[in-house]
Structure formats: C-alpha cells, structure tokens
Image (cartoon, coloured by chain):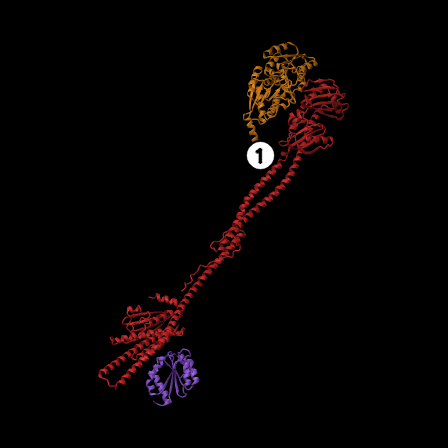
Amino acid sequence: MTVLILVVDDEPDVTELFRQQFRRELRAGRFTMDFAHSAPDALACLKASDASSLILMFSDINMPGMTGLELLPLVRAARPDVPVIMITAYGDADTRAKVLAGGAVGLITKPIDFDLLRSEIDRRVTSIAGPA
Amino acid sequence: MSKPLAPAAVSNPPMPDVTQPAPKRSLRRFRLRLSGKFGVAFVGLVTLVLLIHGAVDLFLNFEDAKRTAIEVQREKARAAAERVQAFLSEIENQIGWTTRAEWRRVAPEQRRYDFIRLLRQAPAITEVAYLDPSGREQLRLSRLEPDAIGSGKDFSATPLFTEALKDKIWFGPVYFRRGSEPYMTIAVAHSGRDPGVTVAEVNLKLIWDVVSSIKIGEGGYAFVVTSNGHLIAHPDLSLVLRDTDLSNLPEVAIALASIEAGDKRQSDDYEITTGIDGGSVLAARATIPRVDWIVFVQLPLREAMQPLIETVIQTVSLFFLSVLLATVAGTYLARRMVVPIRQLQDGAERFGAGDLSERIVIRTGDEIETLAHRFNLMASRVQESYETLEAKVEERTRDLNKSLDDLQKAQSRLVQSEKLASLGQLTAGIAHEIKNPLNFVNNFASLSSDLVDELQEVLQPANLDPKSREEVDEIAELLKGNLGKVVQHGKRADSIIKNMLLHSRSGSGEHRPVEINALVEESLNLAYHGARAAQPTFNVTLVRDLDPAAGSADVYPQELTRVLLNLMSNGFYATEKRKAAGTEPGYEPTLSITTRDHGDRVEIRVLDNGTGIPESVRAKMFDPFFTTKPPGEGTGLGLSLSHDILVKQHGGSIDVATEPGQFTEFTILLPRGGGRNAQTIVAQGQSAP
Amino acid sequence: MRRRTLLAGLSVTLAGRSLAALADERAHVAALWPFVTDDPEGLALAATLRATLRDHGKSDLRITDYWGGGSPERTDALAAELVASAPKVIFTYLKQQLAAVCAVTRTIPVVSVGPDPVRSEYAASLQRPGGNVTGFMLYEPSLGGKWVAALKEAVPSIERVALVSNPNNEGRYGNFFAEPFLSTATALGLEPTIATIKSESEIEPVITQLARQERVGVIVAPGTFGEANGDRIVAFVTAHRLPTLFAIRRFAYRGGLMAYGPDTTDAISRATAYVDRILNGENPAILPIQLPTRFDFIVNLETAQALGITFSSALLAQADEIVE
C-alpha cells in the first residue's frame, strides 16, 4: 500500500521543491506525493485516490479560483479521515482560527520549514506504515 | 488644503425695500409733494379764509358804504335845505321887525329908521318897501337908489300884496336883475287889523355863501333850483348868474316831476345819476316848501364810494400781502416741517442701507422727535445685536477655524494613516508577493547546495584522476559557495522583507485611551526579549523611571508600540556597538525609560548610553531609508516612520539629545487628547528650543 | 386812509407839478393900477390881489404891478408894455386901465374891477361877456341918485348939488351917473350940476367955482381921476367948506364929509377868484360880470363938525362907519 500525500498549490515550482526536498524519501518509496495545482484538481485527485492510501493533504490557502479555505470543508466532507494541513504566508491568529475551524489539523507558514515538515510526515507515515 | 475661515465682516442683512421701482425718483417727488402739500395747503387755507373774509367784508362794506353814503347825502340835503330855510327865515324874521301890528302907527321917521336898521341887519336885502293896507307904497329904502317916501305906487293888484295878505308871507319868483343878479321878493304882511305889507327885495347871491359853504366831501356840493328848474344857488356863482336852467338834468327833472305829482316828502330819495359836470354822482334832494325850491346835494359817486373803494383796495392788497406772507411762511414752515421728516427719511435710509453709525438728530419737540428717538433706539439695538452677532460670529468663526484646523490635522493624520496604511498594504502586498519567489530562491538554493553535496558523495567512490577530482572538488566547492551566497542574499532579502512587513504592518487603525506606563513596559519587554531572542548574548541594564501620574493617553497602541520598539532596539544596537568596541572595560550598556506627566501631555524618554549620534547623522536621522546600520541590519525606515507616527498620527513630538560616544536620548511628547490638541503641541514642539 | 392820502397826495403833486409845469414858465399875471407906485392904497390892493391868489393855491406866480397913476398917457404906455410881456391874465382896476388894455389886446383874458364892460362894449352882456373881458363892477348908475339923496339928508340946507366928474365917467352914452343924478336932484328940489374936471390943474378952479355958489353940495364921482386926486379934492373942498360926498370910501377917512361906496378890497378878492379860475383854464367869455352888492356909508364927524353940520340920528343910523 502506497501512502499518498497530496500537495495542493498553484505554484508549479512547489512541486519541484517538494520533489527535491523529499527526494530521498520518494526514492526510498516511503510515500508518494501527488501534486494538484488547483482546488478542483485536488478534489479530482481525492476522488481518484484510494481511500486508504491518502493519509495527508497539504494545501496552500492563496490560490486563484477556489481558495484553500474554500477547499478545506469540501475535502473534510469528502474524506474526513484525511488530515489537512494548510500552508500560508500569513501566520496570523485570525487565519489560524479560520483554518482550524475549517477542520484542518494545522497551519504551517511560508517559508516552509522542511525539517519540521519531514518530521511531521514521518510521524504520520510511521504511525500508519510503520517505521522506515 | 483649504484656507481657514477669515473672520468675515458681518454684512448687515438688507432691509426689505418696499418702494421698489425707481425709488430715487419717487422719493424726490415725495419730498416735493409733502412740503408742497404743506405749503399749498397752508397757502390755500389762508387764501380761502382771506377770500371769504374779504368777500364778506367787501359785501357788507359795500352795503354799508352805500347805505351810509345815501344816508349822509340825505342828511346833507336835509341840512342844506335847512340852512337855506334858515337863511330865508332869518330874513323873514328880520323883516318881521317891521311887521308888528303897531308899526302902522309908528312915525314915518321911525319907520324909515326901522327900515335903515333892517337894511343894516340883513345885507341880503337890497331894497325894502312898505305898502299901506291899500297896497300903496309909502316908503322905500334902497342901497342903490335914493329913498322914496310916500311915492304912492300902487301894488294892490300885485301878488306880492295880495298873496302876502293872504298867506302872511309871500315868496316871489326868482328873477334876475339886469339878467344876471338873482333876486327874490319876499312880502310879509303886517300883523294886526288892516295890515300893510313889507316888501323886501332879497339878493339871492348871498344865499350862495350859505350854499357854497355846505361842504359835501371833496368833490360834492349843494345847489338850489327853483320849481322851474332855474339854478339860484351853486358853488359856482357864475352858473347862477348865467341863469342856468337845470330842469333837464335828470335829478332835477325827477324832482320836479315828483313835486308836480304832489309828492311832498320832505327829505327825499337819492339817485345815482349824472351830475351837472357829467360824472356819476350820488344825489340827494330836499325841498324847501315855502319857496318851492329844491336843494340838491350831490357827491361824485367815486367819492361817495371812496371808502368802499378804499376798503376794496385795502382788502385786496391785504389779501395779496397775506397770500404772499402765507406763501413765504407756508413755504418756510412747510420746509421746516418737512426737514425733520426728511431727516427721518434720510436716517431711515441710512439705517436701511446698513449705516448705523449716525443717530438722527431732531429737536422739534413733537411726535417726529419721538419717532426719531425710536428710530435711534432701534438703530442702537440693531447695532448692539449686530455687534453681539459679530462677536458671536467671530467666536463661532474662531471655533470653526479651530475645528477646521483640528479637522485638517485629523485629516492629515488620517491621510497619513491611510497613506501609511496603504503604503503598509502596498509594502505588505509587495512583501508578500516577493516572499514567495524568495522562498523558492532560498529553497532551491538550499536544495541545490544539498544536491551538490550529494553529488560529491556520489563522486566520492568514483575513479577520478586527482586533477579531475581536484577540479570536481573545486567546482563543487564553488557551486556550494555560490549557492551559499544565493542563500545568504536570499536570506538578506527575506530579512528586508520581514523588516518591511514589520514596519509597514498597519494596525487596526484604532486609537484608544491606553495606560502609558503599561504600554511602555510592554514595549520594553518585547524589545528586550526580542533582542535577546535574536542574540542570546545580548544583555543590557534596564532602568525604569515611570511616573505614576503618567496616566493614560488617547493613542494608536500598536503604532506607538512600534515606535517604542524601534527606539529601544536602536538603543540596544547602539549600546551593543559601544560594548563591541571594547575600549571601555567597565562599560555597562544601559537603557533607561522614563515617563512623565505634563498635564495635557505625557512624556516618554528613551535613553541609551550607546555610541551617540554624530552631528552629520543627526540632521538626516529621520529621513526615510537613511540608516547607519550596515547593510542587512537596518532598513532605514524605523526612525522616519516613528517620526511620522508620533508627529502626524498622534500630533506629538520627538526630540533627540545626544552626545557622540556617550548617550542618546529620545524625548517623546504625546498629547493626551490624541488628535484634538494636535496643532498646539506641534506649534509648541516647533517653537521649543 | 393813508393810502388815500398817498394817492391824493400823489395826484396833487402830479397835478401841482403839471400846474407848476404850466406855471413854470411861471404864469404871468399883470395888474394895471390907477395908483402911483408908492401909493399905500394901491399897495394894499395889490397885496390883496396877491394874498387872494395865494389862498387859491397860486403861489408860484409872477405878478407884475403896473402903476399908471392918474396919467392916461402913462397908463396907455404901461398897458402896451404890459400886454407885450404876454401875461396869462391881466387884471385891471378902474375904467381907464381897462380901456388902455383893451386898446392893445382883445385876446388876453382881462379881469376888470370897476367899470361896466358892457357899457364900454368890451363885453356882450353881464351874464355872458363873450370876449376876453370879465370882472366885477363897482358902481351902478343909480348910485348917482343915491348920492344926491344921502347928501341932501346929511346936509338938508343945500340947494344945489354938483357931481364932480371926470372923463372916466364919460362913456358913449354920456356920464355914467348923469341920469339918476339929475332926476334925483330934481326930485329932491336941488339944482344939479355936473362939473367935469379933465385934469389935475382944473381941480382948483372947478372947486373954487363951485364954492362960489351957496348951499352947494359936492359929489365926487369915482374913477382913476378920483383915486389919483382925491386928496387934493378933499383939501380943496375942505378949504372951501363944501360938504362933499365921495364915491370912493377911503376919502371919508381922509377928510371928506362922507362916502358911499363899495368895499373895494372885497371886490378885488372876488375878482382875484376869477383870475384864479382863468389861470385854471376857464374861459373869461362865460364868466359873468358881477354887480356890486355891498356898499358902505361912512360919515366923518370931525369934518361935519368943522363944517358946522350936525348929522341926524337917522343918518347916523344909516352910517356903516363913523369917523370921529
């Protein structure tokens, strides 16, 4: 079973960034990452994914069209078992409150602290798939 | 920025002008008409009164004069007749001396004597004769002829004898001796039995004296005519002597006719008729019955009416004089009467036009004066109210000005805030936009650096000639170095962005009353801990001197906090630099914070014993983007923004006292009321040395 | 009233001025007298003339007196001179003077006192003269008889009476007083004589002649001659102790026994009124000539006494004036 992590961000370079940042893990096959560049894409991916494979979703808030905040409740409704962590540049309390109220489990701010992210992902994956 | 309201001249509200079209002309007419009215009324009234009076007077006078004249004439006629009568009676009497009954028996000598005496006494008698009872002349005495004694001439058949005996006295007809001398025979019978007759020839020329002495005014006279109309007495004797026949003269004719008709009224009518001389005369007549003469008294009509004419002239000239006087007086009075009214009018005009400076001066002592007084009162009150109004308006203007000022201040602060806000937003926006690419730059640079490491690792086991390996290592190192630089610069850019975001962050834009000491304390903590977080080795002594009476002030707390943070961190930086210089071993970096109450203002002081500020820097320190910090450490926006926040947003002031190498002290003065007293504080701050 | 007097005054002034304008050639009145220049009687009468004219308001006149005395030649000469001076009115006293003037002018108005102009044919009738002559008569012919009667009464003893006449009394119809004189004298039983004295020199002889008669009374007729020579006559008749009656009044005062004549002053006053009227513009032709009205009988007691005459009380009663 492949653990899937979905990353939603309209910026294409984000994909490259994540791939490079988690190249070892990806090469090791610890998990797979899917990248959606818009909310509808994300929803589609969500639908398409295996119910059990998707274990985590990261989503940027600032996206053209449907924003991350709008996407959040939809995702939560569609896959309540998938924890969503929002990514944003604005780390203010207001956004945090909104995000949490939307059902996300956390909020990380840009610039992304990839080490923290790695540990977070690792924890979750480990809890599901066992230690790497 | 609009100019403040100058205290405008309070313009007087215009009085509602009722007489609108061509007011000037109607006013002029009005003036003329009033005084004209007065004058005309006055003159007219006087004229009317005088006319009436004059007419009535004249009429009465006319009647009176006529009546009087007629009466006078009648009287005169009567009197004249009486005088003539008296003349004749006198002669009669004198003759009577010789007709006593005993005279017959008187001796001839005595008779003659008597006759002589008679002639002496009666100058009118020219000749006197005695006829004996048989009618014969016995004695005759004459002035012109010798006496005749006992001539015996027989007169018994003559009327002078017979009539005399019959009627006692006989007045003969008037005859003219030698054609010119008027004579009349008067025969008087003696008394007693068997009487004789004394006959006297009377020269009527002597009546002339009587008649001509009858004075009838200036041009009037009396004349006597016989029953035939012959003139026997007239002031002009020559007329008499000419034996003038006046029976054709109208008055005479009428008189003769009435006598013939038996109309024996004694004093008679008057006539207005043509006199002998041809002019109109007022004539009256009286009859002398015994001789049947008629005395006419005539007065030229003009003279008779003279008093009347005079009265008329008097009345008329008085009338004209009075009218003239009345006109003059009337004009004068009217003018005078109108003058106060005009003064009133002028005054009202003035007041109406808004000139309340002069008061109407009228001292006529009547209602007009009262009216003027009221006008003046009204003007005074209006003036007062204007002045009050002016004062009020000035006050209001001042208030408004102040409000405007305040508003403008607030507006500028608002604009400033907005500017700041928008700037903030802009910078925030920009910052955010830049942040993303920067992140990528950093991330990828970092990744790339890692990848280079990995490459080196991968190449480690590879067989490479030492030269190649050296090149590879070198290049790898170069790559890592470059990427490191990229990361470094990216971090620097990031830091700038952060600073910008930090400094440009607009708060909620609210201002509220805030405890100054609390805010200062909080800022200090933030700054201190922030500094320590950034550099754990950071240490500084904090000195707090917070005035308990500092109280609260209406401020923008976030912005003020930012300012204090800015100042404090600058202070920390300065002290660190001085400490880092290391030249003063016992140097203890200290930051002192002081608050003080200044009534409607509150003072905050930030004092550091750092490196101080050189003169050259001091001038520019508040300029935007001016910084003394090395690149990467400061944006240069801090003090500029702090200044703007303090001065423009809070209406406060910031001053710096410094000594290079010793200390720097920033003094902030904030008005408690926030924006309200902004201007004053600014002015004071600017004027403070 | 003031206005009236003003008007009157104005008109009077104007009239007076116009009159004065007329008279400002200074109207000339010339008077011809039978007296000599300094004769008091003449001067008195001339004064009366002036006074009366002044009373009539004619104060601004030129009045010239010509004193002819008793001389006919002189009178004629003066008349000529007088007329030549072109007076407005001529005043003559007594017959000679009138005759002298009328010989020179028949146009200049003449006011005569004394004679009968009709009788001298200078006027048509008394009531309407018709010419340039008018005036007042002093004597009537009947006085001739009156004088005789008076003389006779005063001196009853006279048997003759002489009328001393002079040429002036002579006219076309004879002596003015002749008829009454003669008839009355006859009626009274007196022998009448008319003695005409032609000249001064004849006075003495005539009077002397008369004095030769016994019981003669003398009547001195009026006239220039009488006026001029009256005093001489008085002297002569007194010397001859002749009872004389003078027609001219004043001689009774001057020694004559008596006089019966008119009041000449009064006559001149009345005549001057005519002068005034003529000066005012009246026509002398229609101013009637007036007869005498008043005569005064004057007796001189002194003379009577000297003549040994006693006047009867009747006579005295008749006298208007008695000279003592």
Relative to B639, is B6 above or below? above
C245 relative to B337 in the view: left or right: right
In the rendered structure, the colour chosen for chain A is purple
For the view shown, which residue lies furthest in the left direction? B466
Q: Position of residue B668 (x, y in %)?
A: 35, 71
For the view shown, which residue lies furthest in the right direction? B193
User: Which quadrant of the view contains residue B255?
Assistant: top right
B406 relative to B207 in the view: left or right: left
**Chain painted orange:** C
**Chain painted red:** B
User: Which chain contains the residue that carries disc 1?
Assistant: C
User: Which quadrant of the view contains residue A6?
Assistant: bottom left
Q: Which is more toward the observer, C306 or B660?
A: B660
Q: Is residue B594 visible?
A: yes
Q: Position of residue B118 (x, y in %)?
A: 69, 23
Q: Tag 1's secondary structure?
A: helix
Q: Position of residue A103 (x, y in %)?
A: 42, 83
* Residue indicated by mark 1: C7
Q: Amino acid at mark 1?
A: Leu
Q: Which is more toward the observer, C31 or A28?
A: A28
Instruction: For the N terminus of chain B, give its image quadrant.
Output: bottom left
Q: Which is more toward the observer, B635 or B642?
A: B635
